[in-house]
Amino acid sequence: MEDTPLQPGLYVAATPIGNLGDASARLLRVLRGADAVLCEDSRVTGKLLSAFGIEARLQPYHDHNGASVRPGILDRLEAGAALALVSDAGTPLISDPGYKLVREARARGIRIHAVPGPSAPLTALSVSGAPTDRFSFHGFLPAKTAARKSALSALADRQETLLFFETAPRLASALADIAESLGSRTVAVARELTKRYEEVVEGDAADLAARFAESPTKGEIVLIIHPPAPDAAPSEADIDALLREALAGHRVKDAASMVAKRTGLPKRDLYARALALKP
Ligand code: SAM
């Protein structure tokens, strides 16, 4: 099996997210046998290959050259080449290049082979202890606070675990925006997964924001936001605060609808209370 040539097609191949021991036997066979390895950064993938003594031909494929090199890659695949697509780490296409290549290859009837393996969001979810029955992944949060709060507010009503990538320098401010936009939420900060300083720190968003503002951290991070607590019935003060916030920019009826959607409380009761609170 090891010596048989690879079948033609595009191999979408996941690589380790830190621990080289996570490179699967099949990944190594594909990297060894491919006619070329399409990679984001030749230096990064070059290090992975040399760690395993693999001499593969590397061809850069990234956001800046994708449009110009894609037609040639697709022609090669159509002519019967076996090409591997990798990213710097983890599963290609997940906040990484490759989507258009896979889509266009599929449209041309080229065989796409899955070579699954590590991916930071799923790895983080699997060790976080957050509910896994329903979850959604949203890539990186916007860097600026206004855009970030608006992205978070759009997700406030979702009864599911939310996954985001985050950078260490923005961690504390992102957590503060999570606390402000989503209220009290349990958040897990999954850091440096599979590496030496791997850790998962869990707490209330506001507490974690204070903790990381005081002691900034380093490394690669996935944020896992738990769904709103199902039995967290809001207090009267919470409801009044939500209504006041909504009334600041909306008519009474709309404010009541918004808070009803957010809390699950009857719209009629909220309308009556909003009328009483209206300045
Ligand atoms: N396609 C990759 C995957 O499937 O894992 C993700 C690519 S995305 C551009 C890179 C981000 O993933 C990092 O900025 C960080 O947020 C997260 N990440 C990657 N490796 C990680 C690790 N070992 N621990 C925690 N987060 C990680």
Image (cartoon, rainbow, N blue to C red):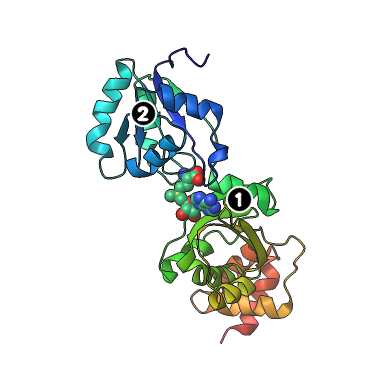
Cβ–Cβ under 8 Å for marks 1 and 2: no
Determine if the C-beta at disc 1 is less than 8 A from ligand 1: yes
Residue 269 falls in image quadrant: bottom right
67 lies left or right of 105: left
Around disc 2, counting alpha carbons within 10 Å, would you say few (fewer than 14), some (14 to 19), or many (20 or more)? some
Element type at mark 1: helix
Q: Earlier in the sequence, mark 1 or mark 2?
A: 2
Q: Nearer the viewer, mark 1 or mark 2?
A: 2
Seen from the viewer's position, the closer of residues 115 and 58 is 58
Element type at mark 2: loop
- In the image, is residue 232 above or below residue 76? below
**Residue found farthest to the bottom:** 279
- In the image, is residue 211 above or below residue 16? below
Residue labelled with disc 2: 56
Residue 261 falls in image quadrant: bottom right
- In the image, is residue 225 above or below residue 30? below
Residue type at mark 1: give it. Answer: Ala
Residue labelled with disc 1: 124
- Which residue is pictured at 51% across the width and 79% down the height? 248
Seen from the viewer's position, the closer of residues 27 and 148 is 27
Residue 147 falls in image quadrant: bottom left
What is the x, y in percent for residue 27? 50, 29
Around disc 1, counting alpha carbons within 10 Å, would you say few (fewer than 14), some (14 to 19), or many (20 or more)? many
Residue type at mark 2: give it. Answer: Ala
CA distance separating discs 1 and 2: 31 Å
**Residue found farthest to the right:** 231
- Which residue is pictured at 41% across the width and 36% down the height? 50
What is the x, y in percent for residue 265? 70, 66
